[in-house]
Image (spheres, rainbow, N blue to C red):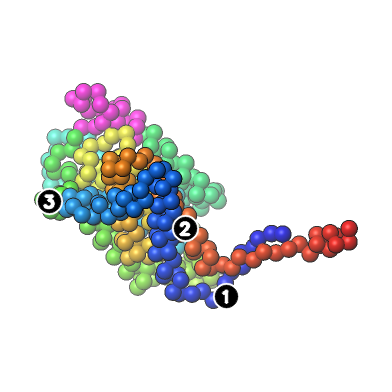
Amino acid sequence: MRIELERRSRQSSLFAIVSPLLALALTVFFGGIMFALLGKDPVSALYSFFIEPLLEVWSLHELAVKAAPLILIGVGLSVCYRSNNWNIGAEGQFIVGAIVGSILPITFYEWTSPLLLPLMLVMGAVGGAAYAAIPALLKTRFNTNEILTSLMLVYIAQLLLDWLTRGIWKDPAGYNFPQSRSFVSEAVLPEILSSGRAHLGIVFALIAAVAVWFMMRYTLKGFQVVVLGQSERAGRFAGFSSRKMVWFSMMFSGALAGLAGISEVSGSIGHLQPTISPGYGFTAIIVAFLGRLNPLGIIASGFVLALTYLGGEGAQLSIGVSDKVTRVFQGLLLFFVLSCDTLILYKVRVVFDRARNAATKGA
């Protein structure tokens, strides 16, 4: 006996739309079971996790701060995944973008020109794109699996950041703390409102989402992404280059990840330190799939995943749970998103081996 997946000849558009909501509901249900097993009241715990962070103005600002990098990275990854190129290293591109974008305010720490912040943002995007070009080169030149190469590069970026902040970029007046000099005010992203910390990073994210949605829907480049993603052979027949698409999709997603990195450092932290991300690059993979690889859907899913970060921080204080609960919720959500999509696209069949059955009957 074996289990096979048979692709459905007709797919329900209703279930395709409802799938993310079903996955979210299943995540909340099994999350409640998890809290019960931990000895916590499920209703109170889920309230602390998903509702309480939405009741204060300052927490809404924090939600926007955490959603900005998730949306930016998720939008870039959606282009990669729809073109059938699997960039798993957005976390590394996020970090390298932050490093490259911080060269000017750290090296020329007395420079206060109005050009400083725009140059930082451009350099951050270029840094992320250049780092994503490494797995693109390895794939197009040596046919290397981009999943492995992009993922391994994440750990190189993390070690590079740690080495810089503990070494040559460590603040000489920082009392030996492993961090760089604090950025001057001209190198800091301005806040949107005076009532909280939300900065222009969320504006960049929303603009990027709308721009990519327009590109995918109304431009030739978007059509190329879709065609090559669904059938490379059909794309070649239409005159589209799959090699060029590898470079474009990887570097495009890397650029948005790099922009997210320097925006996070400039807008929320104000300096470089050994850890600048709680795993935004990996969580953005969930954001992309929960948003159906649609840039507008990614806006909503970005806020949902940002809520798990914010709610997890609050739940640690209010009900005394581990910070790993956030990771469990994100893992459950990814599991149920992929499971629901699989059951929508495929039928599960149980196949019995006839030869084995015949031999058994003969015996």
44 w.r.t. 7: above or below: above
Q: From the image, state whether disc 3 or disc 2 is nearer to you.
A: 2
Quarter of the image for residue 179 reads top left
* Location of the N terminus (image quadrant): bottom right
Q: Which residue is mark 1?
A: 9
- The answer to whether the residues at label 3 and label 2 have Cβ atoms under 8 Å apart is no
Q: Which residue is mark 2?
A: 336
Main SS, magenta region, reads: loop
Q: Position of residue 312 (x, y in %)?
A: 32, 46
Q: Earlier in the sequence, mark 3 or mark 2?
A: 3
In this rendered view, identify the residue nearer to me: 230 or 354.
354
| Mark 3 neighbour class, 10 Å CA radius: few under 14, some 14 to 19, many 20 or more | few
Regarding mark 3 in the picture, which secondary structure is present there?
A: loop
Q: Farthest residue to the left: give it.
A: 194
- Specify start and end residues of the magenta stretch as a single range: 161-181
Say what amino acid the circle numbered 2 marks: Phe
Question: Which residue is drawn at the image coordinates 53% and 63% (left, top)?
Answer: 342
